[in-house]
Amino acid sequence: MQSLIRTAQSRDIAPCAALLEVLFSQEKEFTPDRAAQSRGLGMIINNPQIGRIFIAEGEGTLQGMVMLLFTVSTFLGKKVALLEDMVVDPRWRHQGIGSELIHHAMEFARSAGFGRITLLTDQDNEAAQRFYRSKGFEQSGMVVFRKQLEAFEALEESTAGKPSMQAWMCRECGYLYDPAEGDADSGIKPATPFDELSGEWRCPVCHAEKREFNILL
Ligand code: FE
């Protein structure tokens, strides 16, 4: 099974968001939210200094993905990476695609001078833990702590019942119009609903017209 592994681009946002739904449906702590996932993917793809998303393609379809998010270790005095969102489409599992993805990510990090890769996985997901051990990862004695700064319910309420403040995605290139942000380059102020954009407005990435956008539900 030979897949092509490459860095994700804007046009890969929609299929990657769909694939993340698979991951977040199986991870205990998360529930999928297509708009939030698209927004997050866009932040990384459009800002390569934040991280890199690698995708596996084969037979004309997205088979899997993994991402590295970049940060710094003062202990090592080096760049280090967090490995996140490793997922293979269930239809393409057990064919070595996960291994190809992780080897690609590790090789990228090594050649770019990163000192370490850290990842989190579910405590009871023994298959995932075996997989990462087989790739040379060792379980850390550190415990994960988190503080949620905005409740999920609050995030949902902020857009629930307000379709005008929902994000829209360009079908041509995957660009996400987020009403909260607007589109500064086109003089669109933050908090401008998609409906209020004039017919002259174009996708800032590929110049597609408004009718080429789909609402993200
Ligand atoms: Fe576009």
Image (cartoon, helix red, strand yellow):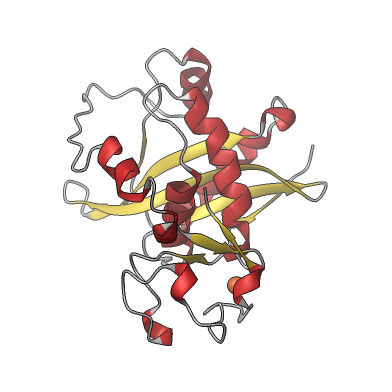
Residue 195 position within the rendered picture, expressed as x and y whole percent measured from the top left:
48, 70
Q: Does residue 148 lie above or below 5 as drawn? A: above
- Rendered residue at 59%/43% (across/down): 18
* Residue that lies at the very extreme toward the right in this rendered image: 59
Asked whether the viewer can see residue 208, the reply is yes
Query: Which one is nearer the viewer's eye here, 84 or 189?
Result: 189
- Rendered residue at 75%/47% (across/down): 61
Query: Which one is nearer the viewer's eye here, 33 or 115?
Result: 33
Q: Does residue 192 lie above or below 138 as drawn? A: below
Residue 59 position within the rendered picture, expressed as x and y whole percent measured from the top left:
83, 46
* Residue that lies at the very extreme toward the front in this rendered image: 161
Q: Does residue 179 lie above or below 3 as drawn? A: below
Could you say which quadrant of the image residue 175 lies in?
Answer: bottom right
Residue 10 position within the rendered picture, expressed as x and y whole percent measured from the top left:
57, 64
Query: Which one is nearer the viewer's eye here, 26 or 113?
Result: 26
Could you say which quadrant of the image residue 100 lies in?
Answer: top right
Residue 42 position within the rendered picture, expressed as x and y whole percent measured from the top left:
47, 60
Q: Quadrant of the N terminus?
A: top right
Answer left or right for 64 relative to 187: right
